Structure formats: C-alpha cells, structure tokens
Amino acid sequence: MTQRAGFVALIGEPNAGKSTLLNRMVGAKVSIVTHKVQTTRARIRGVAIEGDSQLVFVDTPGLFKPRRRLDRAMVAAAWGGAADADVIVMLIEAHRGITEGVEKILENLGDVSKGRQVVLGINKIDRVQSDVLLALTKNMNDRFPFEKTFMISAEKGYGVDDLRVWLADQLPEGPWLYPEDQIADLPMRMIAAEMTREKLTLRLHQELPYQLTVETEHWEERPDGSARVDQIIYVARDGHKGIILGHKGETIKAISKLAREELTEFLGRKVHLFLQVKVREKWLDEAERYSEMGLDFKDGN
Ligand SMILES: Nc1nc2c(ncn2[C@@H]2O[C@H](COP(=O)(O)OP(=O)(O)OP(=O)(O)O)[C@@H](O)[C@H]2O)c(=O)[nH]1
Ligand SMILES: [Mg+2]
C-alpha cells in the first residue's frame, strides 16, 4: 500500500463557498459558514481520507481588495495558504461568473502557483442552467491553464466526491500527517470562539460583524464531565456593546444559547458558556488579537 498525504488549499473570493466545501470534504463542521462575505479570517485545516490518501484541506479567508490592517492580514494568510499547498483549488461562483475579483485573483495566481497544480472548482451549480457552465468553463480556461475543471455544489454535495478522488491521486507519496481519526487542526478553544463569532455574524447587521472578535479566555474541565467555557467578545465602540447585549440582554442571551448548543453537539457533552463583551477601541491594531486568530501581525501592516 502506497500512502499519500498533502495539502489542498481552497482559495477564492469571499462567499465562494470555501468553508462549505471544506466541511463537506471533512464530513463535519470545522469552519464557520455564513451568507456574509469575509467570514473566515485565518487558515483552517480540515483532514479527509480518500483511499490511501490523507488530504489536508486548507480553508482560507476570501481574497478581496484589503482596506484595513485586519483585511491585509487575512489576504496575506490566504495567499500564504496557497503558496504552501501541493494543490490549489480555485473556487468561483457559477451564477456570478467572472467578476472583477476573480480577474484579480487570476492575475496573482500565476506567480503563487508555480510548481503546483491548480484546478478550477465552479461552485453553486445548483443555482444555474448547465449551458452557463460550459461557457464559463471555456472562458476561465482561456484565461488560466487549469489542470482540470470540476463543477460542484459544496452545499448539495454534487461533484464533491469526484473532486476528492482526483485530488487524492495528485498528492505526493509519503506517510500520513495526522492520526487517522483527526478531522481538524485547530485548538478546541479557537473552534469554540469561531462558533460564537458565527452566531454573532448571523445575528448582527451591517459592519458590526467585521468590528468584533471573539476569544476563548478560559476553559475548565469539570469533574462531572462538562466543560465551562468563558469567552470575550471584543468590540471597538461602546455603542456596539449595547447592540450586542440588546434590550435587557436578550441579544447576547440568544447568541449564547445558539453557540452553546452547537458546542455541546460538537463535544458530545454538557457545556456551560459564559460570554462577556469588552470595549477595546484599538483591538484591530493589537498584535495579541491577531495571534489569537492565527494571523500574522506586521508593523505598518
Ligand atoms: N446555493 C448554494 N449555496 C452555497 C453553496 N456553497 C456554499 N453556499 C452558500 O454560500 C455562502 C458562503 O459560503 P461560505 O462557505 O461561508 O463561503 P466562503 O468562501 O468560505 O466565504 P468567506 O469565508 O467569507 O471567504 C453560504 O450562505 C453558503 O451556504 C452551493 O453549492 N450552492
Ligand atoms: Mg469561509
């Protein structure tokens, strides 16, 4: 038996469906998903097995034109993920086609992809007619020498098995990188913080989800088998704190309930979740916040 193992980076514009695809490949929710752009902030690894191959999928933040320091760190993490991978899957949305953002990614892809295979994944095919797909496939392949094109629906699961089987064959021969039963390479405290951030992002409007971060401050295993998890939601402004708390604390209570339920299911045991909102005007410029997220913090970033 020849074992194979390697890294498959998922890149694309925000909202392309990268995290949905990673979760589908792994068979569990390790990366958060929302209908909003810029949900994923750091590189998240999920592990899948196909035959004798161990595929380490690397979910990345979406590629977009960065404005803030956090944006730049996210985009750098995404390109870094691509540069470290054995194979790159570029995801685009079938119904949106070749957007300006897709063109920008293609411009940079040539350099980053040197020495590694790049495949195109046309996602969300459940949203279009098939004639659109043929034209889009041709148009994209005229612009970049993709090794292959896969038409998929990460959400519905169409075409995903074919993609995984093909990817498994491309990986270099070598011993597996993770124990057989490991599905994610992300500390539990970070997975838990991400779950809370997902619920916040789904519930809050406009800019607020982009102006906050969640950290797991304390994790205590209790003798009765349950876990006590304390998290801090950092916001930049007093007004934001009020919105998150809501009238009589209703908003934060609802968010806490949803996050606790998801964490309970993930861990398979009882969880006591405590959320606290802290105003920290400069959190977007604090190195520690970035390292907690798994992002590089550069001076003058
Ligand atoms: N119709 C349809 N929707 C999909 C499909 N795949 C993902 N979505 C939806 O697209 C939205 C974005 O999905 P994500 O997986 O969060 O996208 P992402 O590329 O990780 O986004 P960022 O983390 O912001 O870069 C969510 O609402 C998903 O449910 C698909 O195959 N079909
Ligand atoms: Mg994502």
Image (tube, helix red, strand yellow):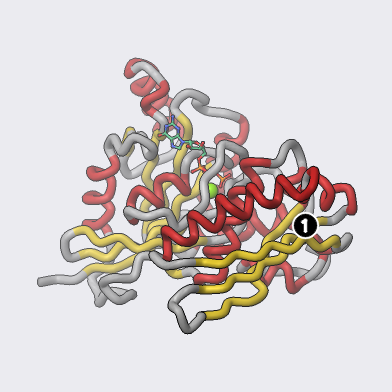
| Residue tagged 1 | 69
Residue closest to the eye, 27 or 48: 27
- In the picture, residue 235 is in which quadrant? bottom right
Residue pictured at 75% horizontal, 36% vertical: 206
Q: Is residue 256 left or right of residue 57?
A: right
Q: Position of residue 204 (x, y in %)?
A: 70, 41
Q: Secondary structure at mark 1?
A: helix
Residue pictured at 28% horizontal, 53% vertical: 167
- In the picture, residue 41 is in which quadrant? bottom right
Q: Position of residue 138 (x, y in %)?
A: 37, 26
Q: Which residue appears farthest toward the left when viewing the image?
A: 1
Residue closest to the eye, 83 or 10: 10
Residue pictured at 47% horizontal, 48% vertical: 19
Q: Is residue 94 left or right of residue 162?
A: right
Image quarter hosting the C terminus: bottom right
Q: Is residue 48 left or right of residue 38?
A: left
61 vs 15: above or below: below
Which amino acid lies under the numbered mark 1 shown in the image of this protein?
Arg
171 vs 94: above or below: below
6 vs 21: above or below: below
